[in-house]
Amino acid sequence: IPQSRMVSFSIIAHVDHGKSSLSQRLLELQGNVATGEESALDTLEVEKSRGITVKAVTASMMYGEWLVNLVDTPGHVDFAHEVRRSLAACDGALLLVDAAQGIEAQTLSVAAAARSAGVPLIAACSKCDLVTADPDAVALALCASGLVEDDDPDRVLRLSAKTGLGVPEVLPAVLGFAKQEASSRSLPLRARVVDSRYDAKRGAVCVVRVVDGVLRENQKIIFLSRPEEALSVQEVGLLTPAPLRSSSLPAGCVGYAICGLRDVRRALVGDTVAESAVEPLEAGFQPAIPALYASVFPPDGALFDDMARAVDRLALNDAAVTVEREPPRPSLGSGLRVGFLGVLHMDVFRQRLRDEFDADVLFCAPLVPYRLVKNDATVVDVKSLDDWPAVDDDEVEILEPVVDVDVLVPTSFLGAAVQTLEPRAKRQLALETTGETTVLKYVLPWARVVDGLSEELANATRGYASLAVDHAPRFETARGLVKVDIALNGTTVDALSFVAARDDAVKKGRDAAASLKTHVPRHQFEVVVQAKIGGKVLARDRIPPFRKDVLTKGGKTVGGGDVTRKKKLLEKQKQGKKRQKTIGNVALSQDAFWAVLNVK
Ligand code: GTP
């Protein structure tokens, strides 16, 4: 297939606007998957169980004489980095807007991401079958917003993944993205790594877009970030999305390459694959800056290496995750400090470690990256709350990460949205009302965004407000923040400490102690939970002793004399213990570590 007949596009939209459903329908129409088959795109356990896309998926399909590559992207804000990375592999993007919901905050932010990546857009209304759908009004709004270049509302596609309406018009429209430049297949090889994942048998599997030349099996190649390591291409092919082996991938193709890379940290997304030292390709996207760090530990120190291996392998699959060794902590031993883009991102990573790597890992409550400026002007990143200055230390300035937050809300819910945002915000940047919708822009401390802002906003506005967050935090002076410590039987557990606004700290301390009371399992001795600021006790709760014996329930022995049944129950109890960490003499489960996170 000539390079001029290859085109790659991604589908971008606000969360739940129907990207995966449309992608699936397109694959059915081109015969890549059978009609009615379960989603070929959201295949991860975590995607099926939560009904969301967390990972961009690539699928190539034949359309007449054309090879069209489709990238289905995630919608949730925490995975915006996947969208930006996908755009780097695309000639254009289809901006999808739910015809019943209209333009939402992320419609604006993904369109802006496409614009800054220089990726042209065409627009489409999805879910046109819904009785509440108003595709004409949405098409008009799209054209008036200036999000797409073509301002003719009649050319906005009207689609329904449910009935199939308009779906056959998508690929013909997308062909317009094809580059009309001369073929670059005779040039020396250059291919951009756009994604990678770990395969237990084959090592790193990279998704690449071949820009120049041809990538072939058995070819000797290098990754330009480490040219000294010569590698050989073991296998290449297209993704449909199932792998379809071919002997070569010429320029224009998006496909997979396996190069025998066992050290997964080597397969860097954004790197260039070449035969010799040539000019590297631009990555096409900025590396992600973590907005949240969680310390992760194995329940048993001896399992640290297993845990680190699993984390590294999963991190290969997610270029937005950063991993570093953490100095051993007195209460927890050796651990890793893992950076994420948000709470959902972290929770999905935790679930995937369990689902895909069977790794038993405990995550501490996450911390946003605070910074300290000492009076000699040295700047220190707060890596754990051990570094937090004492309550009366006036010589240290605390900086907190802040982000720009855009909220799109029907004007009738404006009051409710402002009431939710004002107490959290540092300042308002804009309030622009156009007819029935208002765009609000605020600067918020990142900690106040991750602390349940989107849920609170959805509750206050009955789900009508939508939120987009710029994921590149800046630092500003923080005022009135204090560290709240949690002590169990008199010993402060550093992993349970958290930061709160001074006027909120007493309530949060009390709530945390109460929440721990329900999340720390009973022991054979009493456990006293205290929340403190400095040495001052804010709250005290006690967990009475209790002997947990799974073989008795309400005083009766379970399972009678059946030995296998008893064994099973004891095995279950052992499994439960596996996921606990004993600090001092108190066993803490994952719930306890996160009990402080859920405090409102
Ligand atoms: P994320 O990737 O998580 O952002 O979601 P998405 O944009 O891929 O949306 P998805 O395709 O998962 O669809 C979201 C919901 O809308 C699901 O419940 C779908 O069944 C429903 N849906 C998708 N397309 C249509 C459609 O054309 N008509 C109707 N009625 N419902 C649809």
Image (cartoon, rainbow, N blue to C red):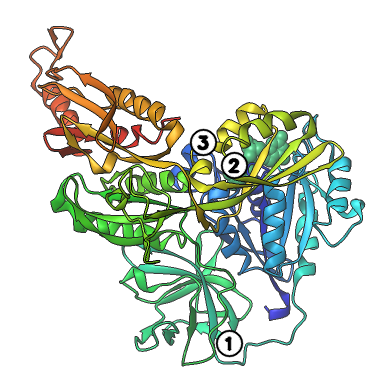
Residue 168 location (% of width, % of height): 78, 53
**Separation of disc 2 and disc 3 at Cα?**
14 Å
In the rendered structure, which disc, 1 or 3, sits on the residue that comes first in sequence? 1
Q: CA distance from mark 1 to mark 2?
A: 51 Å
Q: Which mark is residue 213?
A: 1
Residue 421 horizontal side relative to residue 146, left or right: left
Q: Give the amino acid type for the residue marked by disc 3 in the picture.
A: Gly
Decide which of 432, 358 is in the foreground and name it: 432
Tell me the residue that label 3 is attached to.
452
| Disc nearest the viewer among 1 and 2 | 2
Question: Which numbered circle lies on residue 128?
Answer: none
- Identity of the amino acid at label 2? Ala
Answer few, some or many: residues within 10 Å of disc 1's Cα (few below 14, many 20 plus, some between 14 and 19): many
The one nearer the camera, 374 or 133, is 374
Image quarter for ligand 1: top right
Does residue 20 appear in this view?
A: no
Q: 445 and 135: which one is in front?
A: 445
Q: Which residue is mark 2?
A: 425
Q: Amino acid at mark 1?
A: Gly
Q: Quadrant of the C terminus?
A: top left
